Amino acid sequence: MVTAEAIRQARFRLGFRAVVLIGLMGAGKSAIGKRLAGRLDIPFCDADQEIETAAGKTISEIFAENGEPYFRDGERRVIGRLLDGGAKVLATGGGAFMNKETRDRIAATGISVWLKADLDILMQRVHRRDNRPLLKTADPRAVMERLIAERYPIYALADITINSRDVAHDTIVDEIISALVTCPKLAAAS
């Protein structure tokens, strides 16, 4: 467990920046994000929920009715708005960081944290829910393998990488807080 002083330092170094969690579906962005926000005493936002609220539709409905490019454009705008709102923990959808404009906005106003998980962990987690439009296919594992191949090289551009694995969520939160305290980008800014 990280100390109260480490939490205080992490929060101080963040200033008005957002901690932006990136990674594939099933990496734990929402579950970890809520706990991290609680520990840092800052708000938590889930970009996917904000998109659904703004659109008045579920992400599955947006994909089905308007397609992925339409969804990605809305996602970019919503994340941009959320990044302007001061310190928070922001969980993003798996494809959000793939957009260069979004990556640049996150780099300018936040700290990106990649929750990196291996394929077996991701598959174990995503099978628990039926709301993943990209996985509504005959071979979800092949889709996840393709997404790993496409996205992991871009996710590797994140400021911090944390291995998401089957441990207590508080263990991952502790690792993120410790990484925030020692993050060179935050040390230079504080």
Image: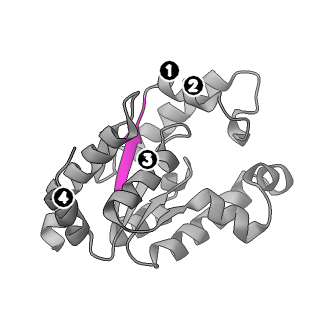
How many residues crowd mark 4 within 10 Å: few (<14), some (14–19), many (20+)? few
Left or right side of 26 for 106: left
Relative horizontal placement of residue 34, taking residue 189 as reference (left or right): right
Q: Which residue lies at the image location 43% right of the left edge and 38% below the top edge? A: 152
The span from disc 1 to disc 4 (Cα, nearest Å) is 34 Å
Dot in front, 1 or 3 = 3
Q: Position of residue 53 (x, y in %)?
A: 71, 67
Q: Callout 4: helix, strand or loop? A: helix
Q: Is residue 173 magenta?
A: no
Q: Which residue is mark 3?
A: 32
Of marks 4 and 3, which one's residue comes earlier in the chain?
4
Q: Residue at x 45, y 68 (%)?
A: 43
Residue at mark 4 to residue at mark 3: CA–CA distance: 19 Å
* Residue type beneath disc 4: Ala
Residue drawn at point x = 30 percent, y = 43 percent: 161
> Looking at the picture, does residue 116 appear above or below residue 60?
above
